[in-house]
Amino acid sequence: MAQTPGSEARTGLKLISPTAIYVILLLAVPLATVLMYSVMTGGRGNVSLPLTFENYTELASKSVYGYLLLKSLMVALIVTAITVLLAYPVAYFVSFHVKPERKSLWLFLITIPFWTSYIIRVSLWFVILGYDGVLDKTLMALGIMDTQLNFSSYGIPAIIFVLAHAYAPFAVLPIFVSLEKVDRSLLEAGQDLGESRWVTFLRVTLPLSMPGVIAAALIVFIPTVGDYVTPKLVGDGKQPLIANFIETQLLKLQDFPQGSAFAVVSMLMVAFVSVLFVLANKRFIGGQK
Amino acid sequence: MTFSDDRPTMIEFKDVHKYYGDYHALRGINGTIKAGEFFSLLGPSGCGKTTLLRTIAGFEDISSGVIMIDGKDMAGVAANVRPTNMVFQSYAIFPHMSVEENVGFGLRKDPRSKEEKAKAVAEALEMVGLKGFGKRAAHALSGGQRQRVALARALILKPKVLLLDEPLSALDKKMREHMQVELIKLQRQVGITFILVTHDQEEALVMSDRIAVMFEGEIAQLADPETLYRRPATRKVADFIGTMNFIPAEILSEAGDKVEVNAKGLGHVALDIAQAPEKTGEAPVVGLRPETLTLLYDDQKAPERETDGVIDEVIYFGDMTYYDVYLGGTDVEVRLSMRNVPGRPVLDVGTKVRVAWSPSALVLFR
Amino acid sequence: MKKAPFLRSYTLFYLLFLYSPIILLPIFAFNDSKVVAFPLAGFTLDWFREMLSDQNLRIAAKNSLIIALSVASVSTILGIFAARASVRYRFPGKAPLMGLIMLPLVLPEMIIAMALLVVLLSLNVPLSLFTVIIGQVLITTPFAVAILTSAFQSLDKSLEEASMDLGETAWSTFRLIILPLVMPGIMASFLICFTISFDEFIISNFLGSGQPILSVYIFGQFRFPAKVPSMLALGTVLVCFSIILLGIAEYMRRRGIAKAGGKDSGGFL
């Protein structure tokens, strides 16, 4: 208990060491390895010296890589925008129009789908939207359609739809939390000063809840940009995104240096966009002062 | 409330320093606390009073110096073997235990039989006025009850020193005043040394045998309540404890045990050297407590000195009225308090008055 | 509360959207037809029978259970260490270490899986359930740390001090005071890590060397239309299972807050 700063630091380090050693060995070292591989030469399952930047120049020179990165980025950003826009009114409703004692129940209802098997949810869409799927067969049985709609084969739009559904509950919670923090007397003050409810929302509530919106965007963006299952199942597997492409490069082609370089660039892209989100958040927080 | 100096020493501080990184939290604490004393550490927040208490308990190491408890150096002695027990500001009642389990917590390694321990718990609960509350769940208690449980839990171990960290600050005013009296009674009953940390000067004055007033990691004055109130050692102490009027003054002469000053609005006054604490180098002022100034009605005569004045503000408190009065045609304003007894009307702003005062009530800060 | 009929119906509609595929699970799991489509053909338990008699499914479920139990235990223990250290102590390198531990939250899972796979392959470590466990622990530990951090934070430090003050040692204080009070958090962490691990696909797929693991098995089976109804039956069971686990986790979390005398300030995450 009685501790000098030195002994406190020692106890703290001792306590965290099992977890720290675990993540250093099994996370930091592998990530560093990927980074190292990305500047080595080689192919088909082996890597060797000399060190080279060729893998990166290769990435830059071939448009297929850039196209893939850009496509994945666009898909993830669209999904993010859709989920956040759809989630905001829900979060607003629960925060402002639900009795405090009922809020937990609503949040619980919203989060349950998130905790039910992701694989099953995505696969269900495949069953629903795919060729001979529930949607098509039902529509045909009811005589509304006479040909297969086969929405699942629509590629990118189908992927976006399924991802937006899969990550929807992620967006509600952070927005809800930031709305809960909005001081209710500020809103009364806004209306007291003669603003309409809508203008008060635009000038007070929305800016104050921006940190939650940006947190929500981040929470949706990161897993969607790296999603593997959805492009594989829906979209007929013909629209690979980053994760599918990394698999092809590293496992199927066994091109470790090139695959590593691609993984590094994807990581940088995700990090870059995330930093942009965080900076935007800082601006909002700064702007409130 | 006098305290005899011949009691044995319980705690002794010798040049105690405490650093948190670069922050110098305790800056050379010296002093003794006597056995059986009700001792208070009084000061504004951040003055180091809680840190000092926690160094006694053993929750904080000291950077240098010595703390002795009952003649033993406490360096390297862990909190769990020190002869002290603490009542925490938050009471720290274990929420997953009943009242009984809380109070008996420290008896786990006690060699006594189960029945004897249960008896001790029951006695401790009775002592703090919670007889029959043993089976209650801790979270079902009110603030005052929690505090009693915390007291019983600490006292059951019969510590040499009981440490109380702002124990009354979470209670409302009525309850606080009630508990102040109860704590004093309890301390007399058990005879254990109590050390109370508080920022409430009234609380410290009411409860303590002696008080250490702390500012910025140092003890500014260590004295009994009356001395502290009547003869504060510095202007800062005077300002912190109660209300005091400060009147600019000029030192005319200082010879033997007399100091002669010219105080603005009061005129020439000869003071005893006892009324002038050690020099601190600040601009000289004389201090006067509001209750040592009296308004003279009609043809009343001042027993010692009197000065003319004009009432600038009247603050009516029911039992008392406070008057702010300009003294002797100067811009020196003093506050004085008058009891509202029958036949003594409350005066209006602008009334010309005569103010009686006594040179012996003055304190000179220089 | 002010009434907001439009927002209310929008929210209900949104919930319907969230639940729409899940609602189909029990409907078609009990539907007496190989074809998954409306109109329904009648009630049957055949699909549940088929599910129960599926030998491979049984192995996959057993493997998943072994993995999820191991992952939940390991990451909760690692989480206890990290959360306790970060809440209670200051030490050099704390921010980068905690950042590294929480990193998998902001890293695409595929990249973690591939990085680990590359290292395992180059060290000639054979892929097995063990390698899946190792990988999944990386993913679930941040969740454990987040849950346990809030559990340790809601613990008043003076409770520990009071226990020490009353004669207990650091270890007995941990056993008598800290552990009972954070136990609900530990249970919640365990259940949530278990659920995440049970559902996890990418690491199970790439670090498992084709061992039957439930999520991978489900993913494969959905491609065969004939297998779909029994998969729907399995899905129904799993969803019920998840909801029960979640209910328990939420109950634990609330009880933990109530025990520590705090106020409820939100749900998971």
Image: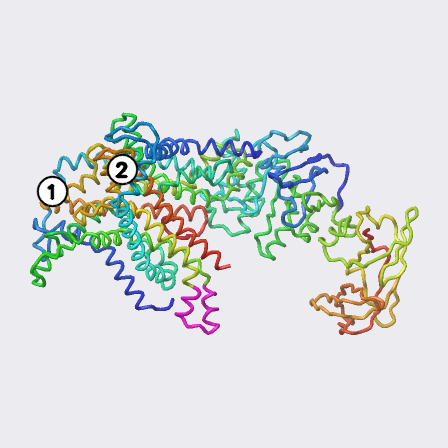
Label 1 residue SS? helix
**Pointers 1 and 2 within a single chain:** yes
The location of residue B295, given as percent across then percent down, is: 81, 67
At label 2, which amino acid type do we have?
Ile
Which badge, 1 or 2, comes first in the chain's sequence?
A: 1
Quadrant of the rendered image containing residue A212: bottom left
Question: Quick check: can you spot residue A2?
Answer: no
Q: Which colour assignment does the render follow?
A: rainbow
The front one of A268 and C265 is A268
Task: Categorize mark 1 by other alpha carbons within 10 Å: few (<14), some (14-19), many (20+).
Answer: few
Q: Helix or strand or loop: what does disc 2 sit on?
A: helix
Residue A26 falls left or right of residue B287: left
- Tell which subunit mark 2 falls on: C
A187 in the magenta segment = yes
Residue B221 shown left or right of residue B298 in the figure: left
- Residue segment shown in magenta: A184-204
Q: Position of residue A204 (x, y in %)?
A: 44, 65
Q: Is residue C260 magenta?
A: no
Q: Where does residue C214 sit, x and y in percent of width and height?
A: 21, 39
Foreground of the two, C225 or B126: C225
* Amino acid identity at mark 1: Arg
Please tell me the numbered disc located at residue C49: 1
Q: Residues within 10 Å of mark 2 (few under 14, many from 20)?
A: many
Q: Is residue A201 visible?
A: yes
Which residue is under mark 2?
C203
Mark 1 or mark 2, whichever is nearer to me: 2
Q: CA distance from mark 1 to mark 2?
A: 30 Å
Q: Is residue A168 above or below residue C69?
A: below
**Can you tell which mark lies on residue B200?**
none
Q: Residue at x 38, y 52 (%)?
A: A215
Q: Is residue A59 rendered to the left or right of residue B175?
A: left
